Image (cartoon, rainbow, N blue to C red):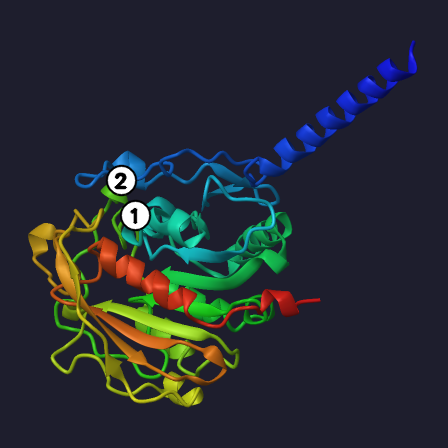
């Protein structure tokens, strides 16, 4: 074999090796055991979301407990890309996929580079028995993507999922990792508004069609659970509270926040009103005949107001968001959902990078 031919073969092999390395680097990242469809898996249509869709338990297996969950992330995610990680918890009597479509941040995963894990409680009510499962999901995401690539880690919880966020924020595992908590009608740090007379449903159906919140079992004692969490957590994190106007009594939202005072924030300030021309995806179909506006009616377009406590120290964000003429169970509209995402992303992150 001539020297020139050997040189040509060597050059060709180097080119092929370089090309293969480059192609491997260009391949989008995938979490182990997941696929990434162009349209989020089991996304509700604009109206009439089928019960079989919202009660689905998810297509990703948590390997230690063998329980499933949903994991949404950008399908063009690159290895080493910076993201925001969100663990989103459903309310009492509900399901993970109802939560995904109630607060549809999966619609913004590409634009804002979000990784969203949405788990399920088998009893449809969160308790300490679920903590290992939740911790395993968090550890999996961190190990797969790398803590250095997670700009911030947020908890999101609706109703009892919000109360559960409040509880686990006080545990050693979460208090050292969570940068922020978004409470979707799940309790307000710094002083709660009072409930309207039509907030609680008058009866609990024997069955739970369409993944309706608080269906299928007795309603838990929320007052007792809230009393146990009355003292504020000691951990440092940003806090956003969202609620429907009809959930509150005539006094409405408090104008002060003890949580804002903790970070020496400036007084509450209203931002420009948010106007949504499109309704949310889901609602509680089992109680419409009770006409309990505080609990929730049909989803519809609407308006919302952000009340921000600006200039908080250490880059924290403290804010309240009120959706006008809405109750507890109408799914969030697109523009108010996006505004909540923007608020979350504007806050300080970085707790995971401090872990040893």
Evaluate whether residue 205 shows in this view: yes
Residue at the disc numbered 1: 101
Q: How crowded is mark 2: few (under 14 residues within 10 Å), some or many (20 or more)?
A: many
Residue at the disc numbered 2: 44
Evaluate whether residue 219 shows in this view: no
| Whole-percent x, y for residue 322 in the image | 21, 70
| Whole-percent x, y for residue 252 in the image | 17, 79
Give whichever of discs 1 and 2 has the lower sequence position.
2
How many marks the image carries: the answer is 2
Instruction: Report which quarter residue 292 is drawn in.
Output: bottom left
Quarter of the figure with the N terminus: top right
| Whole-percent x, y for residue 30 in the image | 55, 39
- Residue 227 is labelled as none
Q: Tell me if residue 240 comes above or below residue 279 in the rendering.
A: below
Q: Tell me if residue 25 comes above or below residue 248 in the rendering.
A: above
Q: In this view, does 33 lie to the left or right of 115?
A: right
Q: Distance between the residues labelled 1 and 2?
A: 7 Å
- Residue at the outermost front position: 4
Q: In this view, does 312 lie to the left or right of 3?
A: left
Q: Is residue 220 left or right of residue 194?
A: right
């Amino acid at each position: 074999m001539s020297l020139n031919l050997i040189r040509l073969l060597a050059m060709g092999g180097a080119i092929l090796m370089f090309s293969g390395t480059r192609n491997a680097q260009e391949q989008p990242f995938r979490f182990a055991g997941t696929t990434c469809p162009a349209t989020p898996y089991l996304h509700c249509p604009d109206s009439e979301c089928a019960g079989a869709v919202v009660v689905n338990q998810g297509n990703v297996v948590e390997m230690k407990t063998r329980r499933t969950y949903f994991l949404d992330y950008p399908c063009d995610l690159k290895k080493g890309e910076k993201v925001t990680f969100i663990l989103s918890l459903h309310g009492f009597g509900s399901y993970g996929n109802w939560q995904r479509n109630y607060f549809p941040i999966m619609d913004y995963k590409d634009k804002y580079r979000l990784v969203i894990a949405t788990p399920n409680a088998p009893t449809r009510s969160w308790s300490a028995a679920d903590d290992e499962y939740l911790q395993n999901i968090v550890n999996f995401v961190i190990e797969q993507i790398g803590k250095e690539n997670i700009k911030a880690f947020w908890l999101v919880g609706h109703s009892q999922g919000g109360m559960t966020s409040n509880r686990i924020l006080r545990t050693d595992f979460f208090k050292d990792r969570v940068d922020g908590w978004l409470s979707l009608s799940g309790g307000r740090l710094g002083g709660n508004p009072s409930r309207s007379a039509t907030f609680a449903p008058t009866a609990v159906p024997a069955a739970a069609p369409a993944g309706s919140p608080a269906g299928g079992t007795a309603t838990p004692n929320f007052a007792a659970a809230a009393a146990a969490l009355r003292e504020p957590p000691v951990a440092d994190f940003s806090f956003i509270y969202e609620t429907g106007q009809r959930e509150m009594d005539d006094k409405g939202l408090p104008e002060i926040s003890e949580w804002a005072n903790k970070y020496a924030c400036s007084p509450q300030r209203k931002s420009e009103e948010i106007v949504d021309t499109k309704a949310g995806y889901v609602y509680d179909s089992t109680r419409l005949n009770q006409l309990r506006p505080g609990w929730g009616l049909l989803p519809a377009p609407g308006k919302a107001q952000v009340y921000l406590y600006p200039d908080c120290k250490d880059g924290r964000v403290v804010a309240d968001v009120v959706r006008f003429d809405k109750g507890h169970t109408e799914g969030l509209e697109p523009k108010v959902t996006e505004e909540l995402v923007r608020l979350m992303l504007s806050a300080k992150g970085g707790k995971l990078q401090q872990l040893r």
